[in-house]
Amino acid sequence: MIPCRRLLLGVVMLAFTVSACGYSLGQPRSELVQGGLRLHVPVAENRTVDLTAPVALTEALKDAVARHPALRLSEKPSADTLSARVEQVTSETRVLQQGTLQATGKQRLQSLIRESCLHASLRLLRNGLEVWSWQGTECEPAFQDMYQAQSDANRNQALRTASTRLAQRALRDLAEGF
């Protein structure tokens, strides 16, 4: 019985010694989950003439980082930096109903939909070096209206919604693949 206790004690001490060196059994956990990665999110770069998209993307990224359980938002540029760039904003008009071309005025506008798409790239920089990159596109419908101001408001809302989905998707990929 005593040799079994010595063997058990030896195994426990060996396991303790190995774990104290940083080794573990099973899958290694992501750095994101262990320590909570602190991210600085500067204003997104803009390669387009659209002024709404970089603001919407920056706000969406900051909100997504703040809500993510393994990430912490930092205002300090010394933290790891999640930089974003709006590569392209596109719009495509589609007809929702047949016979739209014969319709007039408001009926014609109500059956048209403009899909706004946001194409962006993200990079995670640590000490100025890129350690992760990502590209993605999200599209959202924006209904046309007979008043240009309302059509513009619908388009801006579509870009905000697309930005939110794009940010959530990117951070999910970052958390899984980092």
Image (tube, helix red, strand yellow):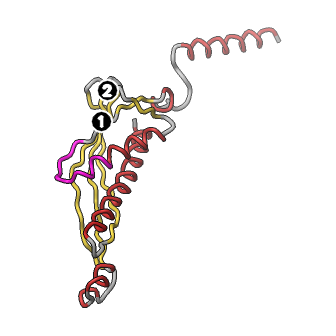
Location of the C terminus by quadrant is: top left
Q: Which stretch is magenta?
A: 45-56
Helix, strand or loop for disc 2: loop
Residue sitting at x 35%, y 31% = 40
Residue underneath mark 1: 42
Residue sitting at x 28%, y 39% = 43
Say left or right for 163 vs 90: right
Q: Which mark is residue 77?
A: 2
Q: Looking at this view, name the residue that lies furthest to the right.
A: 1
* Residue 126 lies in the magenta stretch: no
Say left or right for 48 vs 165: left
Residue sitting at x 42%, y 33% = 73
Q: Pointer 2 and pointer 1: residues touching (CB < 8 Å)? A: yes
Say left or right for 92 vs 139: left
* Residue 53 lies in the magenta stretch: yes
Helix, strand or loop for disc 1: loop
x and y, in percent, of residue 121 in the image: 27, 45
In the image, 10 versus 74, the foreground residue is 74
Decide which of tag 2 and tag 1 comes sooner along the chain. Answer: 1
In the image, 84 versus 53, the foreground residue is 53
In the image, 154 versus 167, the foreground residue is 154
